[in-house]
Image (tube, rainbow, N blue to C red):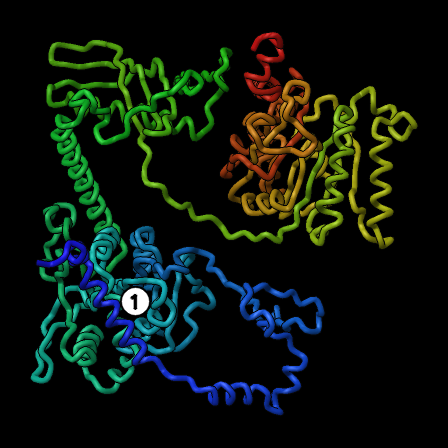
Amino acid sequence: MMPRGLTRCKGIMPTILGLTIGLALSFLRAPVIEPDECRIYETSLDSANEALALDNSVPAFPASDEEEDFEPQIIVDPKLKPKVDLEANKKKVVRSRYISTELGIRERLVSSMITSKDTVSSLAIAQNKTLGHHMQKLLFFFGSHEQPFKGKNHQPAGMNIVVHPEEDEIRILYQTLYYLYQHYNEVYDWFFVGYDNSYVAGYRVNEIVNHMSITRKLYLGLPARIHDEKIDGYYCKQSAGFIMSRALMMAVMPEMNKCLSGIQADSPDEWLGRCLLTLTKGEVGCVNTEEVQTYESINLENDQQFDVETASSKLFEKAVSAFPVATTTEVYKLHKRFSEVEIDMTYRKIEFLQEEIKNLSAKTPQGEDGLSWPIGVNPPFQPSYRWEVINWDYFDSTHTLTCRGGGTTALPIFFFDMEKKDVHDIVATAVSRLQEKYKPQNMEIDLIKLENGYKRFDPQRGMEYMLDLKLRVTVDSGQTELSHRVDLLRPLSQVEIIPMPYVTETTKINMILPVSVDEAEALKVFLDKFEKKVLMSKDKDSILLTIIFIYGAAEAEKVHQKDDPFTVQKERLRALEVKYGSQENRPKVIPWMSIKTDIPSQLRILDVIVRTKKFTADSLFFLASPHADVNNDLFDRCRMNAIAGWQAYFPVPFTQFNKEIAPDVKEEIEIKGSTGHFDIYSFDETCFFNSDYMAARSKFAQKSQKNQDLIDNIDLYELFMENSELHVFRAVEPALKRRWMLRQCSVKRGDGAVDRCERSNAEGLGTRTQLAMKLFPDET
């Protein structure tokens, strides 16, 4: 019988035995280091070649402290510190401008149309008008030994045209593919090639490439059989167009030049098909179906009696192209028909999705009661508190009655041209929908007038309308008049990038600074900051400041006298002239002029500036305020957002609250909710070109020839809105910071200007909490 002690150790005996055997084996396998080997290692370190280096070095481990803990030693002598070349170790990291470039994300599709010098001014232009807005990039190619655009033959505007120095059709196709490969191989995933004697539905091409993998070696088009004993396969007909993948381009283009002399064919499309089959050893030929996507085309040559207007819509629903076309009229007729079919298909998809939403609504927690109108559009915005309530604006056919800023006073305002078009469009849409709805009931509906209209912009849905229409309803028994209310919604659609003309950040800015007598003290602070930000910087030559001293009738008599209200400011300008003006014939550093007026309107000031003829028509103006802080970011934003003949920029400034009401307000302006707000009623600062102002001013002068006083009732914003075709860009500008000021709201400026002035004063005092604490300081 085993002893009780051994019985308890029975469970750990295998562990003890394993450790014992492992230690024994480790001792047997360990290398034996002889003393002689250690001496050899030490001798090598003390060799003659290294003796000098070791004498001047600091040992890493002291010999006397082998058994103590390691303590680092600090090298004080700079000669003993290791030399590190910091410049050699600096590696400049070059970051891509766009994250898509850094991640290797390419664009989807680049398209090309092969034309000729005879049709580039006819069919190619028609193709550009019908296809260009669908494609990310569209290029036109043709061959010519001579310069095609000379004399009266001008190059068509708005088209990217590449001319090859060869006229052979096969070589033109090769040069086109090689150009696309050379310039866009790293930019796009798909390449479309078509001919101008066919119509191409751009939306169908985009739909095909958006649903296919980019890794496929694909040659997609309308297949035609190659009848040859050596090659068995298909090529894509050139008139129908074809799509090639980037993967196929990379595989065949380096060797495609061999096909120019090695393959004979009757047409360019057959040559390309033979070349691709040869280079890929028969793996890649033309196909018309890939990943459930089908490439179909309408061959108009087979049916001489084909009528685009009466043909079945089924032919156009899946077709990518139609060929051949001989005139631009045929191109436009096909475009009209394809567009109608696309719209019908879109409406059917919307109805289908709406039915699906209806069927699924029963399974939601809200049930069918949770459905919003229209079905599939976001529900109306629900305010969380009363300040988020969206107000409705009242309007009729000529005026709008708006309570701006949520106030209680509403003013009737005439519609701008675009607002008139908007009202006319929604009224016409409402009447047409009513006629479409009640026509099956033998009811004819005619509009008598718009009685009432209400509109508001919902950030989740779009622009909402309620219309009270007075209608004349005609039935078999007679006519009757009635009032009917309809609801309309112009939903938010897909965001699109608006193409803008190219601008640069090197344009010279002519800053115009009008200063009234009440703003004389503010000008001191402005000049101090202007000196630091502009005059002392390297960009001082790109900013020209012109100050306009505005005198009233009483102050005008004191000009050039000791009690001139601007004496201190003019002395400051002379000091800056002495400090920064180095040449005798050089223009003044900060030129200034004086004008006399009791109503300092923006148009009167600008008229004086224009009459001086010191500024050319292409001068960029920046109308500023002495209460604003200027900086380079603001100047760059002005240059980029003001575009001659296209756009004027009206930034929304961040304005400080009154220091006596808002305790957080400091000298340095900080963008915080407790220190200020973005003043949406301020139009004092603006960027525009002189040519745009002169054009709008001339148009306004023709309207107001009989009443010259109208110039005081309109500001620059209203001038551009009513008398020009410019885009008026209005956006908050964090780089434009302005100190608080109490505006002088003159009744002579017109009702609209007075209303904006008073609201700017009221909302610029402080937050509601700060105003309440000022009124009731004892309340907590």
The reply to whether residue 300 is in sight is: no
Quarter of image, res 172: bottom left
Quadrant containing the N terminus in the rendered view: bottom left
**As rendered, which of 187 and 427 lies closer to the eye?**
187
Q: Is residue 268 left or right of residue 59?
A: left
Q: Residue at x 9, y 61 (%)?
A: 302
Q: Position of residue 161 (x, y in %)?
A: 39, 65
**As rendered, which of 16 and 255 lies closer to the eye?**
16
Quarter of image, res 79: bottom right
Q: Amino acid at mark 1?
A: Ile
Q: Residue at x 49, y 85 (%)?
A: 38
The reply to whether residue 477 is in sight is: yes
Provide the secondary structure element on which disc 1 rests.
strand
Residue that protrudes farthest toward the right in the picture: 562
The answer to whether 666 is drawn above or below residue 727 in the figure is above
Residue that protrudes farthest toward the bottom in the picture: 48
**As rendered, which of 299 and 501 lies closer to the eye?**
501
Q: Is residue 233 left or right of residue 655?
A: left
Quarter of image, res 604: top right
Q: Position of residue 49 (x, y in %)?
A: 61, 90
The answer to whether 284 is drawn above or below residue 398 in the figure is below
Q: Is residue 200 left or right of residue 615?
A: left
Q: Position of residue 501 (x, y in %)?
A: 49, 50
Quadrant containing the C terminus in the rendered view: top right
Q: Which residue is mark 1?
A: 114
Q: Position of residue 152 (x, y in %)?
A: 45, 64
The answer to whether 716 is drawn above or below residue 485 in the figure is below
